[in-house]
């Protein structure tokens, strides 16, 4: 498998080597093999991240409070996105009548495919109308473990494999040993190497108020959290760690548009921007958060 190499500005750091699935879909080397590669970060995920950032965050889970601005933005995004996908599904208003017009053998051949397509559309509807809101309710309900927000630190590190001694690596590359982390030290459910990222790799790690440490993994032109909740619930558009990241960005870099959707490096080494880009620039340029009417 070919990799795309990014050279850090700091000559002491290793290059960031990414597999094709980690690139933007418009990149000529992009390739995502459904079924074997990790799932892509879908556009809806980028848009929800933008909605939260532009709304000023989403950490309050007071059930008696009016609907937050972020949730209003998100609800409008969900409706609009679902409606925009209608064009991908051929519509047969009277499917039974339509099939009755076809020869019997052809009807038998076509009917399973039509019903399968309807099931896919129903699953997609359920994702937008039920699963995503449930996902957001769940992470808001566990947000207390991320507070105070400033206690969540984003650490620029070099991730090394189990055969590499962090002290020796730090000495050889003139780096601080605190900025060298073995992959096995992470709490990740899915490790960077399992995403096809070549080690050693300069990545951003979230060190959270809850006590967990997760590497964010460059994928689909952004980063995705490697925690168990995000990695085992493929329908989940966000985990609480990504929620903390979005809420952090809601108040950071207000005067710097280019950095507005890139996670800040609070401590550690200055890793390539691609390793801490939180929102795809393509989606950021095309999505405007809007309230539900």
Image (cartoon, rainbow, N blue to C red):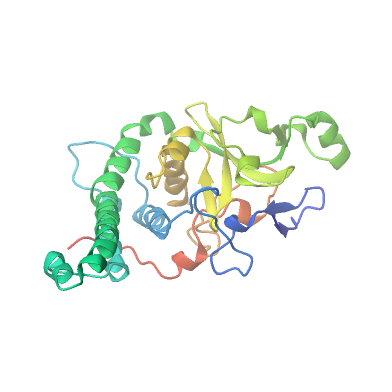
* Residue 10 vertical position relative to residue 258 in the rendered view, above or below: above
Name the outermost residue toward the right.
172
Q: Nearer the viewer, residue 120 or 187?
A: 120
Task: Judge from the rendering whether residue 215 lies leftward or rightward of residue 65; answer left or right.
Answer: right
Q: Residue furthest bottom?
A: 101
Q: Residue at x 49, y 68 (%)?
A: 282
Q: Nearer the viewer, residue 52 or 150?
A: 52
The C terminus lies in quadrant = bottom left
Decide: is 224 above or below 91. Answer: above
- Can residue 290 be seen in this snapshot? no
- Give the residue drawn at x 27%, y 57%: 112
Closest to the observer, 213 or 34: 34
The answer, for residue 66, to whether it is visible in the render is yes
Q: How many marks?
A: 0
Position in image of residue 25 (x %, y %): 53, 65
Looking at the image, which residue is at 17% across and 68% down? 99
Placement of 69 over or under 225, stated as above or below: below
**Viewer-nearest residue: 151 or 199:** 199
Q: Position of residue 147 (x, y in %)?
A: 42, 32
Image quadrant of residue 85? Answer: bottom left
The quadrant the N terminus occupies is bottom right
254 left or right, relative to 213: left
Kindly identify the residue that appears in the image at 50 percent across and 58 percent down: 260
Residue 265: % across, % down: 61, 46
On the picture, is 288 further left or further right than 207? left
Q: Where's residue 130, x and y in %? A: 24, 46
């Amino acid at each position: 498998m070919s990799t795309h190499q990014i050279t850090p500005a700091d000559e002491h750091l290793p290059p960031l080597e990414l597999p094709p699935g980690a690139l933007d879909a418009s990149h000529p080397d992009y390739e995502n093999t459904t079924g074997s590669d990790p799932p892509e970060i879908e556009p809806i995920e980028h848009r929800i991240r933008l909605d939260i950032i532009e709304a000023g965050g989403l950490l309050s889970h007071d059930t008696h409070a009016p609907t937050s601005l972020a949730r209003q933005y998100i609800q409008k995004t969900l409706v609009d996105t679902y409606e925009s996908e209608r064009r991908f599904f051929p519509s047969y208003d009277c499917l039974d009548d339509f099939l009755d017009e076809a020869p019997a053998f052809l009807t038998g051949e076509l009917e399973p495919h039509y019903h399968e397509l309807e099931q896919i559309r129903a699953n997609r509807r359920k994702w937008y109308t039920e699963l995503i809101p449930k996902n957001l309710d769940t992470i808001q309900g566990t947000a207390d473990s991320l507070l105070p927000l400033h206690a969540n630190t984003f650490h620029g590190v070099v991730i090394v494999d189990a055969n590499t001694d962090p002290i020796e690596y730090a000495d050889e590359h003139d780096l601080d040993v605190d900025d060298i982390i073995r992959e096995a030290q992470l709490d990740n459910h899915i490790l960077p190497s399992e995403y096809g990222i070549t080690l050693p790799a300069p990545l951003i790690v979230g060190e959270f108020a809850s006590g967990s440490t997760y590497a964010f993994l460059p994928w689909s032109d952004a980063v995705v959290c490697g925690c168990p909740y995000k990695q085992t619930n493929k329908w989940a558009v966000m985990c609480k760690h990504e929620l903390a990241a979005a809420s952090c960005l809601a108040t950071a870099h207000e005067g710097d548009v280019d950095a507005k959707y890139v996670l800040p490096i609070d401590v550690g080494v200055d890793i390539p921007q691609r390793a801490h880009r939180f929102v795809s620039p393509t989606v950021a340029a095309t999505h405007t958060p809007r309230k539900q009417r």
